[in-house]
Structure formats: structure tokens, C-alpha cells
Amino acid sequence: MPVIRTITLLLALALAWFAGPSRAADRIVLDTAQPSLALAPHLTYRVDPEGRDDAATVFAQAARGELQPMPAEGTAFGFSDGAYWFHGQLFNQSRSEQRWLLVLHYPLLDNVDVYLRYPDGRVEHMVSGDTLPFSARSIRYRHPNFWLDLPQRTEVELLVRVSSRSSMQVPLAVYTPTAFAELERDSQFGIGLFYGILLALFCYNLVLWLSLRDASHFWYMCHVGGFGLVMLCLNGLAFEYLWPNSPWWANQAIPLSMALSQIAMHQFCRVFLELKQRQPWADRISQALIAFYIAMGLASFFLDYRAAVRPMTLAVFPGALYILYLAINAIRRGYAPAKVFLLAWAFLLLGTALYASVSFGLLEKTFLTEYGIQIGSALEMILLSFALSYRYGRLRGENERLVLEHNEQLERHVARRTSELSTALEQLAEANQRLRESNRRDALTGLFNRRHFRDMFEHQISRANEHGQPLGLLLMDLDHFKRINDTYGHLAGDECLRWLGRCLHDILVEHGALLARFGGEEFVVVIPDVQGERLLMIAEQLRKCICDDPVRYAGNNIRMSASIGAFLIRPGSGISADGALHKADDALYAAKDAGRNRVHAADGVTSV
């Protein structure tokens, strides 16, 4: 049966040939003086919507002049159903070249059939496309290609049938072997340069990510890898080098790599532009786009090729414009690294728009539109690498500045406290002293913390008993401090506590007092060698200072008041540190019960 069908096809082609010469197509004269020639201007074509016509039928239609001239806008027809037939008359005028190479400069075509009909009626049929193993091609080349045996001074009829679920682009050209070798040399150099740039950027950022563990470098690396995989698929290099014996995977890899590339691209944008912190609403939109591409990537295993590719290709435009808007908005908000990001993105957006416009048949296939995405993406990747370096340098400079300021502040703080405690801590080395001071201080007010106060308080009680000196104890609490936090905010409350720490220190430093933040808005003061009346005078001085001077913060004058409980520890009384604190605490609550903003003395404070 296959033999009978073949004989029938050949007889039909022969009848079509004898039906009369083609009147619609121009003769295409091939000569080594012009070693390469684009065929589109010389061809006629027809659309077979159902894809059911055979070569004999189309040969007969061409002979009757029923085929149309090629459209002026070029050879890009967008996403189309059915099959396209292209017809032309080849006349080899060269005396030295009998073999010419026919190349279809678009790698994503599913089925390409080439028919050559010779003057004696013989028909030669050749097939190619990415539904066949890569080895089915005449030469190992990323674009479908065919060797044409064209006898000298002989007219041979050419018929090409193309069908594809991808974008229909049919830029046909013929070359002498030498001309094709020169073309391929230049093409391979440009492609090698492009992928060399991507590989270098990938490895460079891989090293940076392994060293710094910065998420922006990781997602940039994924963006480079994903985009490189997309370009390998779109250029036909993935089919040629990665899976030449798997036509199914050659087609499946295209929507899958597109999804991976877009996921990495939007995630990198989220991290680089710090959307979560700077533009939370935009971050949610980016997450939705990422979810869309994840869903489309998974669906590509079950959907028809075109049903998976077309939505993702269409989504590239709004997605790219959205990222462009995010970059502009980030610049308006004062985020300096977004300037380089915007420039890089503009190049990629332009290149992607040119390539996608050809896929939908909006622009003619030229060098700029075909390779615009490679040029734009290479510039984008390089500029994004600069943007990452700029961002990292900016963050490092900011961190160094903060560390320097913190160190300077810490040094001033330690120097001031060291001078006050030089007598008690003179036996310790300066470095150990700074560490010890840092551990004993309250971070907000700079006063001693509660733990250190307990240690020092017990020591002072022992010392006072040894020298027979009284020891004054003041326990104070800010009145209605929660109201300040609720009215002016917690930052204002923190400023009030810092101001109070400074105020207490300025008044008590001349008395050699031990001053500490006891907890929250409570403060404790221990004054050595002081009598009861003097203790109450100091407490009243503290109360008036707190009450009379408002705290200025954010344009507000915040007034405070404090209740103070006073207790005098007499030498030899045998009272413990906890017992003294309970006495002072009882006096403090008595001051609060009496109306707040006052000093209350425990029993026996004024007595001798």
C-alpha cells in the first residue's frame, strides 16, 4: 500500500507538471555572484486552513496561477492554524555550484516539507521540523535546512509546506556551502558572545551568593539561568545540544522555560526593589503574577502547546510594563539603585517587545527584530549586574556608617561612664571595663540596670554599716506614663525616659549617688552618707525638675510628674536590701495614694 500511494503521488505531480508552467511565480535565478538569496520576494503562497491539501494539488494550483504573491509586510504570519504552502521556480545559473542549501531561519516550526520537481517529472520530498529528531536535518544546524540538488542551467520547481503550533515565521533563503559557512561563523560568534556573557554573569553571581548569601544575587542568578534557557529553546540550540532525540521535550521545554524565566524575573524584581517593605501593594501583585506563571508552567504538561504559549507570551507585555512602572515609582520614592534597574529594564523591554511583535506578525523579521531580545537582554543583564553592585555598595556603606556612628556613640558613652566610676573600677583594664559597662547599662536611658543595681546596693549597705554612715534610698515612678504613650506614641515615651535619665544624672552626680532604671518607668537612687532632711530635699529637687521642665519632642511639650518614696537606712539597723526596697516601695505607693506628684517619707526618715 505505501508503494501504491507513492506511485499515485508521483503520477499526480507529473500530471500537474504537464498541465502547464507556473504563471504566478517569478523565476529565481541562482548564481555564485550572489551566493545567498532571500526567497520571500520571489515566492507565491497559499493558506491551507484545514491542512489537508497534498503537494500534487498545490503544484496544480501554482500551475494555474492561483497562488498569491507574498505579502509586503514579510514572512511573519503570527499564530495561525492549518498549513502554509510556498512555491517558486529555481534556475541554477552557476557553473560551479550544483548543491545549494535551503534554510528556514526560524527554529520553532513543527513540520516542514520540501518538494523539488525536476523537468523530467521526478519529485524529491524532504522533511524536517522539531517534531522529528534533530538527526533528520540535512546538516546539524539549529534552523530547519535542506540540501537542494539543482542541475546547471535547469529550472526546478520548489514547493514548501509549513505547519506549526508556534508562531508562523517562514524566512526562506538559499546559500552556497561557502556562503552558509561564512554566515554560520558570524552567527555562532554572536551567539557564543551572548551566552558567554550570560554564563559569566551566572557564575559571578553564584560566587557572590555563596559568599554573601544575599537573596538578590540568588534570584538574579535564577533570572539569568531561566532567561538563558528560554533563549536556548527559542534559538533552537537546546534541541540541537541538550535533547536532540526528544522532539516532545524540545516543544515542552519552551513554555516551561518561559514560566521559569518569568517566575525568577518577578521574584528578582521583588527582592531588588524591596517591594515588601517599600511597596506592599505592588508586592502582592507581583506574587499574583508569579502564581500565574507557576500555574501555566504546570498546565503546559496538559494543555496544547499554543494554549500554553500564547497566554504567557501575551502576559509578557503587561508584566514588563508593570515592572517598568515599579522601577519608576521606586525612583520617585528616592530608591537610588532603581535608576540603573530602570535603564536595564528598558533595554530588555524593547528587545522583548520587538521579538514578541514578530511572533504575532506585527513587525517584519529583520536582524534587529530577530536578535533584539538577545541584544537587549545582554545589555539588561550587564546593567543589572552593575545595579546589584551599586545596591550592595550602598548597603555596605550604610552599614559601615551606622557601625561607625554606633561605635563613636558607644565610645563617648563608655568614656563618660568610666570617668564617673573610675574609683570603683580602676583595677580593671579599659577594654574589660567597657564590656562590663555595656552589660550593666540600660539600653534606652544609659543608666544602670536592675541586676547591676542589686549587686551594688548590697555592697553599699555593707560599706555604710562598716563606716557607720546612713544610706538614702529613693524609689520613683512616673505618674500616668501610659497616658503619654497612648497620647504621643511610644517613641515619645522613650524620649521622656531618656530625658529623665539625663535629668536624674545631672542632679545626682555631685552626690555620688547610685542611679538605675528599676523597670518600666520606675527608677531607684541610692545616696551615700546623707541625713533624712537632706534626702528629702534631694528628692523634692528631683520631683520639681521633672514637673517643671517639659520634654520637647516632635513639636510637642510633654509634661510629666513623678511620685517618690524615700527611706533612710541607718547604720547597724540590720535591714536587708529587699527589706529597704519594700520600705521605699510602701512610701512610693503612699505618695501615689496621696494624689501623686509628691515625695513621701517612710517612718523615721527625718528623725536623727
Image: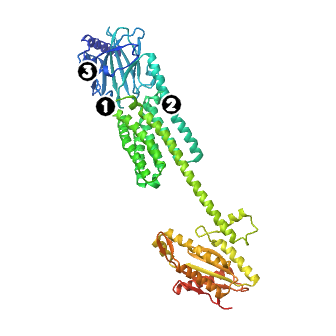
Which residue is at a point 50% across and 68% down the rendered structure image?
A: 491
Quarter placement of the N terminus = top left
Of helix, strand and loop, which one carries label 3? Answer: loop
Quadrant of the rendered structure where residue 500 is? bottom right
Q: Along the line of sight, which residue is nearer the eye, 283 or 553?
A: 553
* Marks 2,3: beta carbons within 8 A: no
Of helix, strand and loop, which one carries label 1? Answer: loop
Give the Cα distance between marks 1 and 2. 33 Å
The vertical placement of 590 against 115, above or below, is: below
Q: Where is residue 595 in the image (x, y as percent from the top left)?
A: 51, 86
Amino acid at circle 1: Ser
10 Å crowding of disc 3: few (<14), some (14-19), many (20+):
many
Tag 3 residue? 67
Q: Along the line of sight, which residue is nearer the eye, 592 or 7?
A: 592
- Residue 80 is labelled as 1
Q: Along the line of sight, which residue is nearer the eye, 142 or 369?
A: 369
